[in-house]
Amino acid sequence: MIQDIKYNGYSASPSDYECQDGDLAGAIGLVPDNGAMKPILPPSVIMQCEENERVVFIHSSYSFIHYIIFNSENSTLYYIDKSLYSSNKVEIAQMAYSIMQINAIGNTLMALTEDGIYYYLWVDGAYKSLGNHLPEIDISFGLVGRPRLFSLSDESKSTFSISFNEISEGNLYNELSEANKTKITDQIMAKVNKFVAQETVNKGRFCFPFLVRYALRLYDGSLVHHSAPILMNPSTKTAPWVYWTRAKGKGAYSTATCNILLVAANLDYNLESNDDFYILEEWKDVIKGIDVFISKPIYTYDQNGKVSSFNDTDNHTTKFIGRLYAENRTTTNNTLAEDKLLGNFSSKDFLDHYCEWTYAQIYAMYYSSDRSYPATTFNLPEFSDNKVAESIKNTSTFYKLCSIDLSEAIENHGTRKDIVVDNEYLQSLVTREVMTDDYLSHDNLCANHSFVYNSRLNLSGLRRKPFRGFISQSMFAYCNGMYNWGANGTTLNINMVPYSYGRYSIAVYIKENDRTLVVQADAGLYNYNDLQLFNSLEFTYTDSTGNSTTRKSRHSWGCYVFYPNPNAFKLVIYNIGQACYAIDLQPHDFLNGAFALLDYELVREKNFTALPTLDMEITPPNFNWKVTQYPISVPNKIYTSEVNNPFYFPLLGINTIGTGDILGISTAAKALSEGQ
């Protein structure tokens, strides 16, 4: 009997006896496609690979299909463009390490090797080799200070007077009564707050300590390679300076004439030379710029506190760390004027150097014809040193200040360039973009397996090479000299003592996976400032009575050190392999890293006793030492990149899978319809 049976499709029932007529149990050489059965055609020969060659990957996009070929004899990676129907191979790269796997996202090809993940970007009709890691950039930030005196810069062009309840002559330097504290505070702080806003916030300048960071902005908006927080010091102790020049009254004092001194500082920068500087141009398609972020100002006085007395002498040693600005380098100015040095100087070469300048010295240079400075200042409601230090330690939120174009930074390399901040930009600083935190984006990754799904790169079988660490120029505010200070009558002699150069380097010790590792930043020329970090110099001090004593120089520069891994526990400065100065690190409470904050005005000398024992068989740090291994194993983690960005693996994309080794990655996706 001949019977027509309608084809129903594949059977979902495992038993033939339970299937309806027309259900298909299996097929050979046919596949279901859109409700129909279509034949599987036999493969056609496109090309013949030569001996020792094999196709390792097919790189396809909407505009091209490339057959990626590896020649094991000469360790060369080639590609053939399918559209050309030619067997002419075009070389991509000579591979120094064996290839474990190749994958691609968009126009970026990734080769997994024993030396990390090598990236090749298809651009302008060719594969551009980018290396195995985003470039490390080192930017030096400095301050350019403009001293400001209320009587010159305020619109009134005069000092200001305050009144208070009568104080007898013998009690003027004693602590104020509660009534006078309130009365004087209201008058002084109103002037201070107005002057600070007028000369700094409204003009894009700074007078309080703050921290600055930078990061690379990638083509998709991601931020990577965050810098260390860099402590900038327009002032170290309480600022501004509020001093009085005359107290008056009948039988007792009831009024005083006052003035205010502050340093309004601009931020400048320079892109430093390092090993990766010369490959930055190759990455311009991936890196779109360098974004700079700053913290809120770290106030050194309590805005809700009260002025306590007329007698405060320690604020004279408040320091501005940076370069002083003056318009009259080649001329002598004998009257007070904004941005002009006053009187005679034996040399003005100091205007080219970034140094530690006390406010007393700044006053003598700009505002005192006889080179004296006010004997006392008001005792503002200043925070204790411990309170200010705690504020610096807890700073973890950074707001966008500006973006630096990568090409501009490269073009200006070697020249310090001002960062121009629009007027009143700082008024709304806390509404700006907030910097993300970093999670080991400086570390190099090496993976055994990769899998691309939903335009994300997934990696497993991972090992990490820890980051080399920051060089001193990119970890500290720029400072390049010291000076000898003296006066010959009213002529100031400021003789520069340039920093010494030496083969110094910074090493960081890390304890991870029960092993102690050490990494080292580039040495020699790149770390010329390191000697000054610990080398307090001896000098002879003669007081007003003629007595001489030997003292040692104190440093306020280079107080904040940071390494972007909370497992780091010690930072050591080396001189040609010999340890000189050791700093203990602690995990930061709010940032992913370890840090230390040294005291201002600290005598720094060789202080190490014993250094940690290393668990790796490697050469101890010396001038040419670098990490070449991938010593940190993370076998039970999967790293998932951002969408269409195989260069960045955010913290939320890192997942731990059990405790064993991950041998491979695949999807567990279920087809939503027939044919998927």
Image (cartoon, grey):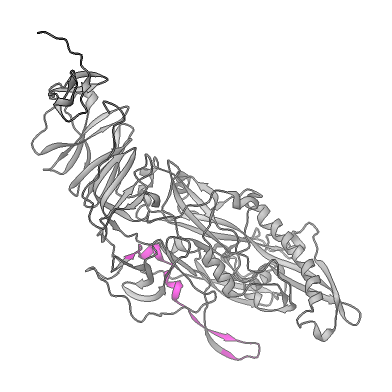
* Magenta-colored stretch includes residue 544: yes
318 or 298: nearer the eye? 298
- The magenta span reads 519-548
623 to 170, vertically: above or below: above
Q: Is residue 335 visible?
A: no
In the orientation shown, which residue stands out farthest toward the front?
A: 17
Asked if the magenta segment contains residue 457, the reply would be: no
Question: Residue 228's x, y, as percent?
Answer: 45, 60
Q: Quadrant of residue 162?
A: bottom right
Which image quadrant is residue 227 in?
A: bottom left
Instruction: In this rendered view, identify the residue nearer to me: 179 or 355.
Output: 179
Of residues 244 and 383, the one nearer the viewer is 383
Q: Residue at x 55, y 71 (%)?
A: 389
- Left or right? Give the position of 257 relative to 125: right
Q: Can you say which quadrant of the picture contains the C terminus? A: top left
Q: Nearer the viewer, residue 490 or 44?
A: 44
Q: Going 34% across and 37% down the picture, which residue do you hit?
A: 454
Q: Quadrant of the N terminus?
A: top left
From what the image shows, is residue 563 above or below residue 221? below
